[in-house]
Image (cartoon, rainbow, N blue to C red):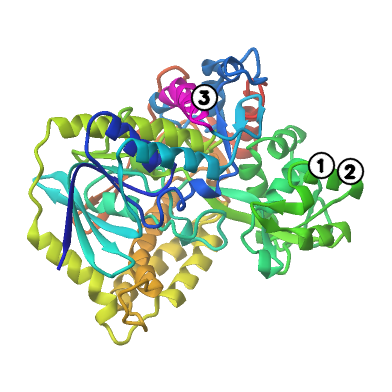
Amino acid sequence: MVRVAVADVLVVGGGGASLRAAIAAAERGASVLLVSKGRAGRSGATLLAGADLTLDGRSLREFGFPGAPDDSPEKWMNDIVTQGFYLNNQRLVEVYVRDAARRVGELLDRGLEVLGSAERAIDTTGESIAGVLLRWARESGVEVVDDVMVVDLLLSGGRVAGAFGLDLKTGETMVFRSKSVVMATGGWHKAYDPNAGSRELSGDGVAAAYRAGAYLANMEFVTFCNNIVYWPPKWRGNLFLYILHSLAGGRLTNCRGEEFLRKYDPVVVKYGTSMEWNKCFISIASALEVREGRGSPHGGVYYDVGDVPWEEYEERVTKFYPNWRFKGVDFSELAKMLRDRVPIEVGPAAEYFDGGLVVDENMRTSVPGLFAAGECSTGVFGANRVAAATTEMIVEGAIAGEMAAEYAKGASLPEVDDEQIKRLEERVRGPLRREEGVKPVELLRRIQRLAHEKLGPVRERRGLEELIEFLEVIRRRDLPRLYTTSKSERYNREWVEALELENIVLLLEISAKSALMRTESRGVHYRLDCPHTDNRNWLKEVVVRRVGEEAEFTARPVAVTLMPPPTGIVPYWEMMREMMLAHSDVGGSH
């Protein structure tokens, strides 16, 4: 028996964007149902965020913090667009800088924990942001359904009619009927290993929206976080050394003991190691060392304290993380290695997905009744994110919720297609019913390894073509043969991973084909075989839509409002230097 639930607005996701959207819709008078794959407010990317909330320095001072006095939303927009390599949708950037202070102020008024501030940021924690939003959602009357994976969207007459889901606790399938839907499901971190995000994020919402007819764009742009631990294996995927490098310094070396960042332009090194640029610059530089045969045994580079005296280094760290503890984790083992001058293997790991669902300024997708917010949407950050995704989620979430509620007011409740539900039921149960075939965990490991190698910070034609060929074979041959060794329907992790794999393969294939199509290097997309930023031919977004069973790729010009892009074809590293120097000198954007 399929369970049915009904609401005016269905919000999908468990993090900050979904909670803020649900709040906004409820405050507009809509009945709201929020469906989360984990526990709402305790799953998704928000909980793991560092975290800070960015806003312009002038607004920060108005809140009573020591923000940059000469800053303005206009200067901040300049920095976001120049450092996004001019690929930003400037209409969305205007919305971001316009609404940031108001949305941050709402959280402050509701008791957000403040740990400190910078020239353009309030330092807090992901737990505090999620906690404030969850309490607010409950006070607003939002109904929350936890531990349900939304498998696909339901359509009726070309418009969204709700969603089909799987209750992970019981194995029951569910139908959510609604007048509008807000997708706020984050990225597809699980496609990569290692990654610096939540392991439950597998692109479910983006893939479901694409299958429903929504446009995707910028799928080639993946932000990698530098200095993620590769070895010792106990700490693999941990971002603590990224934080330490930012706080206390230290050095990065290759297998020859060379400080490889020194060979780059001093301007690039200055900005690329002291600001949010570090994710783009150091990730690419580290990956190049590995590709050229100068990496560590486990595919990274080495981090150590360098010339910083240990007492000074430790003081800088423990000022923020007493006794070497961070979010309840004891890092004294890593501290001992650093104190004893034992190099630790680090490297880039997927952290943020700049591409996703195409939205307008009202967070509408191309599917009537479907809205999107946060990391699963695209446009605001262009080719390189330097401002906070936490601010993005509350700004876009609020707009998406408001607009979804307004849409619902003028819409009737669509009928659902029983045939579509039957097909989805068959698809979901398939891995449980098969007795042999391909095990999800084994396939996932192969995919993650190839994604990291071929679609990491450094790409080139041959590797992209190899990955695409591999994924096409997986899609045709292996996905239809996925099976679970356990046939239990309750909390069956293997079953969930089988369902997630369809989304992971789909999005990786689209991402790789987009990267192959973009024959230049821009922002976090570095093509070894196309080492120029081509402002003559590639100030365009790669846009993807589903036509039949295949993906159709086209290119469209970026949306420009206030800041005309540069012209000409420029070597990538020269372009990066120019973008860094175009910074307003107010301070780090993130």
Give the crowd class for mark 2: few <14, some 14-19, many >=20 residues within 10 Å: few
The residue at 46%/52% (across/down) is 42
Give the crowd class for mark 3: few <14, some 14-19, many >=20 residues within 10 Å: some
- Identify residue for label 1: 316
Q: Which residues are magenta?
A: 93-111
Residue 566: assigned label: 3
Disc 3 from disc 2: Cα separation: 43 Å
Circles 1 and 2 in contact, beta carbons < 8 Å: yes
Query: Of the residues shown, which amino acid type is indicated by label 3?
Result: Pro
Residue 3: assigned label: none
The quadrant holding residue 275 is top right
Q: Quadrant of the C terminus?
A: top right
The residue at 61%/60% (across/down) is 237
Q: Earlier in the sequence, mark 3 or mark 2?
A: 2
Residue 247 belongs to the span the image colors magenta: no
The residue at 15%/50% (across/down) is 155
Query: Of the residues shown, which amino acid type is indicated by label 2?
Result: Glu
The quadrant holding residue 137 is top left
Give the crowd class for mark 1: few <14, some 14-19, many >=20 residues within 10 Å: some
User: From where the camera sits, is residue 373 visible?
Assistant: no
Please determine whether, in this image, residue 171 is positioned above or below residue 222.
Answer: below
Residue 312: assigned label: 2
